[in-house]
Amino acid sequence: MPTKKKKKDRKRNKPELDLELDDDNHTQETQSITSDDDSAEMLNLLASLYLNPQYSDLTIICGTEVFPVHRNIVCPRSSYFARSCGGNFKEALGTIELKDQDPNLIRKVLQFLYTGDYTFEIDGDEEKEDNLGQPSSQDHSRGFNACQFHVRMYAQADYFQIDGLKSRAERYFRGSFLDQPSKDPFEAIITEIYTSIPESDEQIRDAAIELTMDNLETLRNGTEVILLDGFLKRSPAFAADLCIAMLKRRSESQKEEIFRPAASKPLFTLYGGH
């Protein structure tokens, strides 16, 4: 009889234990939701200060454009701005003048610093499209596109030393590489990379070479030949990088073939058949 009572007691206690566990889980979920809400509110507050003169303690001048910014936001994310605001220069007094820079690109750099992202829209407005990046006549004749814009944003990230922007621009570059599968946009993109990005920065070049190799069928054997022999001759650095990468990929493929288990090899390989 005593033994049975103990079993009954355990059964009575079990729901109470489950209730306590449920309370703990509910508390953790509530804390998680609260934490997420706080993070979202903080991000929204930062984003609300983008191009907002309220509390601004630094002014960036680029051409005719004047951008109000906040040191506590731009300096921790950009080594360039951190150095500029920390030295005994005019910048330390509250003004940074950016010469030979495109205000449209600077605006997008600041958008990233405040929001963690940047936008690019092609809405068919020729004036807006022409004003982005380099001189309008050059842009329009070369088939300016989103992918080319992301290359320029990558170059800005390199100049202002913003690692997060580099990664974001490369990701967008990869996603838009053949959005316009034709000769002029492709040549403009590759030329942009090999003229605006320092040779020491191989990240975007490697991405361009990788994407070119992965899409050779489209670039060389499509309805329109996009990658022409003439362009390769006019772009020796790109041609050399592409050749080296193709040889490396071929070599790695041959090594994999050599070390592949015999059971997985085709019969004609094993017996020398055709």
Image (spheres, rainbow, N blue to C red):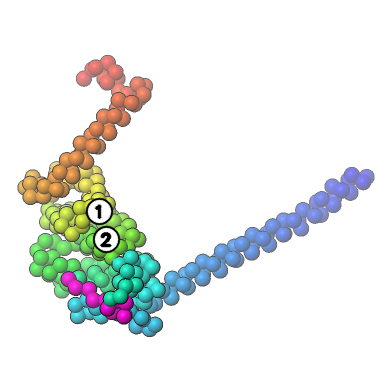
Can you say whether 161 is above or below 126 in the image?
above
- Taking the view exactly as shown, the residue that stands out farthest to the top is 271
Where does the image place residue 38, in percent across and percent down from the top left? 51, 71
Residue at image position (82%, 50%) is 10
The residue labelled by disc 1 is 201
Res 221 visible: yes
Q: Examine the structure image and report whether residue 98 is included in the region drawn in magenta.
A: yes
Q: In which quarter of the image is residue 239?
A: top left
Where does the image place residue 191, in percent across and percent down from the top left? 14, 55
Where does the image place residue 197, in percent across and percent down from the top left? 20, 57
Res 225 visible: no
Residue at image position (39%, 77%) is 48
Circles 1 and 2 in contact, beta carbons < 8 Å: yes
- Taking the view exactly as shown, the residue that stands out farthest to the right is 1
Q: Quadrant of the N terminus?
A: top right
Q: In which quarter of the image is residue 71?
A: bottom left
Name which residue type carries label 1.
Asp
Residue at image position (89%, 49%) is 5
Q: What stretch is highlighted in magenta?
A: 90-100
The residue labelled by disc 2 is 158
Can you say whether 100 is above or below 231 in the image?
below
Foreground residue, 251 or 213? Answer: 251
Q: In which quarter of the image is the C terminus?
A: top left
Name which residue type carries label 2.
Asp
Can you say whether 235 is above or below 72 in the image?
above
Measured Cα–Cα span from mark 1 to mark 2: 8 Å
Q: Residue 140 carries which label?
A: none
Q: What element carries label 1?
A: loop
Residue at image position (20%, 70%) is 101
- Residue 136 falls left or right of residue 9: left
